[in-house]
Image (tube, rainbow, N blue to C red):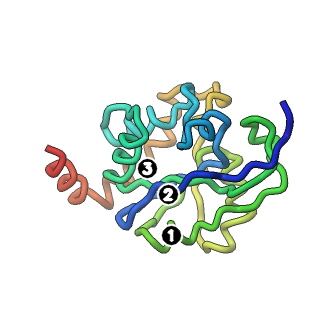
Amino acid sequence: MKTEQVTHEFEPVFDKNSRVLILGTFPSVKSRENQFYYGHPQNRFWKIMARLTDSEVPETIEEKKHLLLTHGIAIWDVIASCEITGSSDSSIRNVVPTDLDCVLSGSRIEKIYANGGTAKKLYDKYSRAVTGREITGLPSTSPANAAYSVDKLMESWGEIRQYLREIMPDDQEKSAGNAE
């Protein structure tokens, strides 16, 4: 597989009520084909989001966006463009970081989480000084992180559920009431 220069082609998911931002590194080949985040069928991201929010696993892009926005979660990636071989984070070179300002200034983000060690490392290198905000690293939901089952991932990712319950209990009840 050859290395190619690739640019991120889809927008972040957020709105003015987003409180948590989850950053990946860069879309995988499957995600780029699907034009949406975490598109590889073996990636556990959407299963984790469903568990965190006590929801069904979303199937369509619209269902995925709805799940995130209903629960105050925003997603994007640390990298705007880079050289990459396939979907391999370890092959990433010549990084142009994402300008996170539109998400951070257009929402109520209080906590930022990294989906995997590479996302955290790249955020710390390129974005932390610009945003002035810390990031919490979480284990990657990628199928390449086979050492972590969904249950084991939830041990770390559950921090997001706890945080959202602390800051949004009334908001979530209102959202649940509106969904009926």
Q: Is 98 in front, or is 2?
A: 2
> Is label 1 in contact with label 3 (beta carbons under 8 Å)?
no
The residue mark sitting in front, 1 or 3, is: 1
Position of 126 with respect to 9 (left or right) is right
Q: Quadrant of residue 60?
A: top left
> Is label 2 in contact with label 1 (beta carbons under 8 Å)?
yes
Q: Give the mark nearer the N terminus: 2 vs 1.
A: 2
The residue shown at (59%, 59%) is 135
Residue 130: x and y in percent read 66, 74
The residue shown at (53%, 56%) is 11
Under tag 2, what secondary structure?
Answer: strand
| Kind of residue at badge 3 | Ile
Residue 110: x and y in percent read 45, 66
Label 1 neighbour load within 10 Å: few <14, some 14-19, many 20+: many
Q: Is 102 in front, or is 129?
A: 102
Position of 159 with respect to 146 (left or right) is left
* Residue highlighted by disc 1: 104
Residue 26: x and y in percent read 66, 47
Q: Is 113 in front, or is 24?
A: 24
Q: How many angstroms separate mark 3 from mark 2 (CA)?
A: 10 Å
Under tag 3, what secondary structure?
Answer: helix
Under tag 1, what secondary structure?
Answer: helix
Q: Which mark is residue 34?
A: none
Q: Which mark is residue 160?
A: 3
Residue 136: x and y in percent read 57, 55
The residue shown at (46%, 36%) is 46
> Is label 3 in contact with label 2 (beta carbons under 8 Å)?
no
Q: Quadrant of the C terminus?
A: top left
Count of labels shown? Answer: 3
| Kind of residue at badge 1 | Leu
* Residue highlighted by disc 2: 21
